[in-house]
Every structure is written in structure tokens, then in C-alpha cells.
Image (cartoon, rainbow, N blue to C red):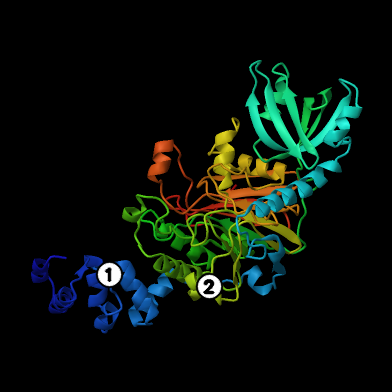
């Protein structure tokens, strides 16, 4: 703030400005007003090293040092509602399924043998699911020569290539431990061609068709490993699980006001009595990645950051998470903006970045994909970077319907979408991207757009984001759906969409 402004201010304000000038700092008007009301303002400023003193930093320091003004502000941010939450009175039953997530157990050296073991592990698991399908009797490729021409033939293979022939027929080369085979889809077979459009490289598929030659099959139907058709499973306890994603703390576009409203709602301070009864059942909160905006994620990012240090971003995230009621069990997965490797599968965020909350008993860091079993139900959480390749390669999918791309991944029982595309993968000797269990819930993020659906007994949900519209989204013509928390009652499976970005709406909006 220019020094001439000091002429219009009181002596204490002048003193604060002069102190900042001696430290080669500027200070905004809101910060000046806050510090003018604080007796120990020098101690607060000595904790701030940035060249521009902002109100956000001042408030954080006041809260941290337990000053009277800080206590008042903390009460405003995390005011505890005077209500008894059902979830607080009920002990949770959960475990993080560490055996299903990457954590250095099968560290890859990137050598040829690692790739071989990776693809073999994928093929063995997915082909075993296909081989048990009713009405499907797959033969090894070397057995095709024993069949007469045009005899019915079922095979299983991993997709190596896919192209359209000179005659306009979709052609797919598949591989298996006993050889390779060519699968042809006639251009006249529209239904089978629609299914062929879904097929991506590295997919493990089943093919029902007719033998054309010892190495060629005419496809009539494709099968995917898929999850079983089943009745949705419910919990015995009347508790709920909530989902948020893509907070992007540190970005100038982070919607902190709306996120603070969400936290206040969880604490019961901005909720109606009916909302308190509803919200008080939330026992589990899942955060599906991109918790901070990170640093150096893309070339133009630095100028778009409010907090330009990744450790400081996680410090601010920790401050926000610690304001969530302690009776809520919080499961935090990483995304491509977090301080973990960009390649999938991603391990959990490490302690050095989240020291402020890593020791909190109710905060649990999981991988992406990560798995949690709670109240007898299985939750799979995957941030969702592979969906960009899925949407780009498949005609019927689009960014505005993330739940449909998520269902495609379930159909494949594989969260990866092929080596060599946009999203990189680490060839772990044990493939953690295949879906080895059948989830009751699949929670995702990354798309910044909400979407949910039921698929074969599994509830698929993407909650959107807490970041305003980005330049990338403007260029793509995409409109995000920010400020949303989705919660699901585990006893009834009722899904509620809680919108905190809607003007004048601090609570729930049933969906």
C-alpha cells in the first residue's frame, strides 16, 4: 500500500505501514484493519515473509497464535453447531484395503521383464473372469486349426492393434500366451461395430464368432470382463458417505468461500434442523484427488497460483481439513496435481507434505486407485486421469457425462486405457489398475463435472470440483460444476447433491 495512504489513517495504522516498509513489504487495506485491532500485531507480521501481506495470511497467523481476534475468526469459520450428530454417536467400521493399492511393494525398474510381468498379470486376471462366463467356451489360438471353416469359435485376447481395412471392415489384432489372431468385424454388422468402437489398445476381450481361417475370426459379439449384475448391497447402519474432489488449494481459482461454507455446514452452523439430521449421518468423507493445485504441473501455472509453494499449499489444505468434525473419517486420494508421481497407479501422499494432518486419527491417505471397506461395503476411489484417453478414443463418450466413462472402466475391470497414450503408467509387476474386487461404490474426480449412475449394483459418482472455470475449460467449451458435495445414505442408497456454490444456498439440494 503506498505510504501516502497513511495520512488518512490513525497512528497505529501508520506504525503498521512503517513497520512493513522497513521489512520491504506491502500490506492491503483489509490486513491493515485486522492488525489495527490486534495488540500484538508485530508478532503476527514477523511470521509473514511474503512481499505482500494479505488478509488470508493475517487470519491464519491470528488463528495459529490463539489471539482474541484469531479465536473470534476461528469461531466464524468453524462454528460448531449445537446438535447431536448420529455419526458422532456411532462407531465406524472400516479398513483401508492396502493390499489393493500401489505402495512400493512391487517397485518397477522399467525393464523389459517388468513390462512382461505387468501385461501377463493383467491378462491372467482378466482372462480368468472371461473364461467363466456362461455360454462362452474360449479356445486357445492353436486349437483353431482343429475347427472347420465357419465353425463357431470363442477366443480371449489382449488388443494389440485396431484399424479399418481397405474394405471398410474393423480389424483387430489380439494376443495371448499361445499366439496371435486377427478379428474382423464386417462393416455390414452395425451392432457389433458399435461394440468394436468401445475397444481400446491393451483391452482384454472375449470374442464370439466364426472361424474364417486358422488365424482369422469373424466377430459376432464382444465380451468384457465386467462386474456381475447384482442387487445393490446396503449397510445395516443408518450412516452416510460423502464425496468431494478436485479442491485445488493454492490456485487463484480455488473457491475458498464456498469450501468454508461446506465445512461450516458439516459442523452444523449453517444448516437447517432437517439438514442437520441429514448431514449428521455423514460418517465417511472421500476426497478423490487434486487436493492442491501443485507447482510446475503445466507451463503457465505459476502465474495462476495464489500460493506458489507446494508445502504451503498442503499447509493450507491441512488447516481446512482440521476444521472438519473429528468423528468423520476422511480418506484422501491423490491426483495428478498432488505431490506424487503423475503416472498411475499413484501411491498415497507422503507424510512430509501433510505433517499437519498425517497424525490426525480420522485422516487416512490412500492411493489412486485406493480401496476402503466401510460398514461392510467396498469403496473404490480413482482420481480418473485415464478417462481423458477413454473419452478421446471413444465416440459415444463426452466430458459432460463422466459417469459414462467411469462405467466403461468398470466394464473392462481395468482403470488403465493403454500404454503409449496421454496418461503414463508404471509397469508394476502386480497390476494395481485392474479392478480385482467388485466395488459397491466407485468414486472419481478429475473431470470437474458432476455425474452419477447405478451400474450392475455399483453406484458410480463424480462430484465435480472446488475450482472456478479454467482457461482450458473455456477453450474446450466446458462448464464445470463446482462447490458440490455428494452424499449417499449407506442404508437406503439415497443420493443427495449438496450445492455450496449456488447463491443463497448453504445446505442440501436433494438429487
Q: Is residue 199 visible?
A: no
Mark 2 closeness class: few <14, some 14–19, many ≥20 residues within 10 Å: few
Residue in front for this viewpoint, 61 or 269: 61
Element under label 1? loop
On residue 50, the disc is 1
The label nearer to you, 1 versus 2, is 2
Write the residue at 63% across / 65% down: 104
Where, by quadrant of the figure, is residue 473 drawn? top left
Q: Position of residue 53 (x, y in %)?
A: 26, 69
Q: Secondary structure at mark 2?
A: helix
* Residue 342 appears anywhere in the view: yes
Query: Which label belongs to residue 351?
Result: 2
User: Which quarter of the rendered picture does the N terminus lie within?
Assistant: bottom left
Residue 10 occupies which quadrant of the picture? bottom left
Asked if 212 appears above or below 51 in the picture, the reply is above
Looking at the picture, tell me which residue is in the foreground, 367 or 121.
121
Pointer 1 local density, CA inside 10 Å: few below 14, some 14–19, many at least 20: few
Could you tell me which residue is drawn at 39 percent across and 39 percent down? 474
Circles 1 and 2, Cβ within 8 Å, touching? The answer is no
Decide if residue 81 is on the left or right side of residue 206. left
Asked if 122 appears above or below 209 in the picture, the reply is below
Instruction: In the rendered view, tell whether residue 372 sits above or below residue 13.
Output: above
Residue 237 — which label? none
Q: Nearer the viewer, residue 415 or 498?
A: 415
Q: How far apart are labels 1 and 2 at the CA level?
A: 25 Å
Q: Position of residue 344 (x, y in %)?
A: 59, 53
Where residue 400 sits: x, y (%)?
53, 38
Dot 1 or dot 2: first in sequence order is 1
- Total count of labels: 2
170 displayed left or right of 344: right
Q: Position of residue 201 (x, y in %)?
A: 65, 38
Amino acid at each position: 500500500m503506498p505510504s501516502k495512504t497513511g495520512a488518512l489513517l490513525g497512528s497505529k495504522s501508520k506504525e503498521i505501514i512503517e513497520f512493513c516498509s522497513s521489512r520491504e513489504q506491502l500490506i492491503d487495506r483489509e490486513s491493515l484493519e485486522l492488525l489495527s485491532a490486534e495488540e500484538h500485531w508485530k508478532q503476527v507480521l514477523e511470521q509473514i515473509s511474503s512481499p505482500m501481506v494479505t488478509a488470508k495470511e493475517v487470519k491464519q497467523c491470528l488463528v495459529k497464535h490463539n489471539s482474541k481476534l484469531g479465536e473470534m475468526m476461528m469461531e466464524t469459520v468453524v462454528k460448531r453447531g449445537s446438535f447431536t450428530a448420529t455419526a458422532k454417536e456411532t462407531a465406524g467400521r472400516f479398513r483401508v484395503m492396502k493390499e489393493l493399492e500401489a505402495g512400493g511393494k512391487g517397485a518397477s525398474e522399467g525393464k523389459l521383464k517388468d513390462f512382461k510381468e505387468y501385461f501377463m498379470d493383467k491378462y491372467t486376471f482378466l482372462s480368468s473372469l472371461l473364461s467363466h462366463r456362461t455360454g462362452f467356451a474360449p479356445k486357445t489360438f492353436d486349437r483353431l486349426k482343429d475347427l472347420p471353416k465357419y465353425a463357431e469359435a470363442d477366443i480371449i485376447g489382449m488388443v494389440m492393434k485396431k484399424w479399418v481395412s481397405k474394405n471398410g471392415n474393423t480389424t483387430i489384432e489380439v494376443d495371448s500366451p499361445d499366439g496371435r489372431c486377427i478379428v474382423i468385424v464386417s462393416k455390414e454388422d452395425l451392432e457389433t461395430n458399435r461394440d468394436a468402437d468401445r475397444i481400446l489398445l491393451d483391452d482384454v476381450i472375449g470374442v464370439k464368432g466364426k472361424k474364417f481361417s486358422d488365424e482369422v475370426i469373424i466377430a459376432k459379439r464382444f465380451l468384457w470382463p465386467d462386474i456381475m449384475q447384482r442387487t445393490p448391497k446396503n449397510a445395516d447402519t443408518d450412516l452416510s458417505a460423502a464425496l468431494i474432489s478436485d479442491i485445488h488449494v493454492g490456485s487463484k481459482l480455488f473457491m475458498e468461500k464456498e469450501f468454508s461454507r461446506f465445512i461450516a455446514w458439516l459442523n452444523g452452523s449453517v444448516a437447517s434442523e432437517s439438514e442437520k439430521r441429514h448431514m449428521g449421518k455423514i460418517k465417511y468423507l472421500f476426497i478423490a484427488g487434486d487436493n492442491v493445485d501443485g507447482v510446475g504441473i503445466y507451463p503457465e501455472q505459476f502465474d495462476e497460483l495464489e500460493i506458489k509453494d507446494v508445502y504451503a499449499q498442503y499447509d493450507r489444505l491441512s488447516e481446512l481439513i482440521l476444521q472438519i468434525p473429528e468423528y468423520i473419517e476422511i480418506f484422501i486420494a491423490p491426483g495428478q496435481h498432488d505431490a506424487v508421481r503423475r503416472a498411475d497407479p499413484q501411491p498415497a501422499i507422503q507424510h512430509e507434505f501433510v505433517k499437519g494432518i498425517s497424525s490426525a486419527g480420522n485422516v487416512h491417505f490412500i492411493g489412486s486407485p485406493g480401496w476402503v471397506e466401510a460398514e461392510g461395503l467396498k469403496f473404490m476411489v480413482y482420481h480418473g486421469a485415464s478417462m481423458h484417453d477413454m473419452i478421446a478414443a471413444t465416440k459415444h463418450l463426452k466430458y459432460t457425462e463422466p459417469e459414462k466413462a467411469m462405467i466403461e472402466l468398470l466394464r473392462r475391470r481395468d482403470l488403465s486405457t493403454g500404454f503409449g497414450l496421454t496418461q503414463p503408467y508404471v509397469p508394476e509387476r502386480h497390476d494395481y489398475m485392474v479392478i480385482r474386487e467388485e466395488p459397491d461404490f466407485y468414486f472419481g474426480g478429475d473431470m470437474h463435472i458432476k455425474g452419477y449412475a447405478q451400474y450392475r449394483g455399483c453406484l458410480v459418482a463424480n462430484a465435480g470440483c472446488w475450482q472456478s472455470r479454467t482457461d482450458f475449460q473455456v477453450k474446450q467449451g466446458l462448464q464445470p460444476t463446482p462447490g458440490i458435495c455428494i452424499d449417499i445414505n449407506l442404508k437406503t442408497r439415497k443420493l443427495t447433491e449438496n450445492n455450496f456454490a449456488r447463491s443463497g444456498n448453504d445446505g442440501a439440494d436433494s438429487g
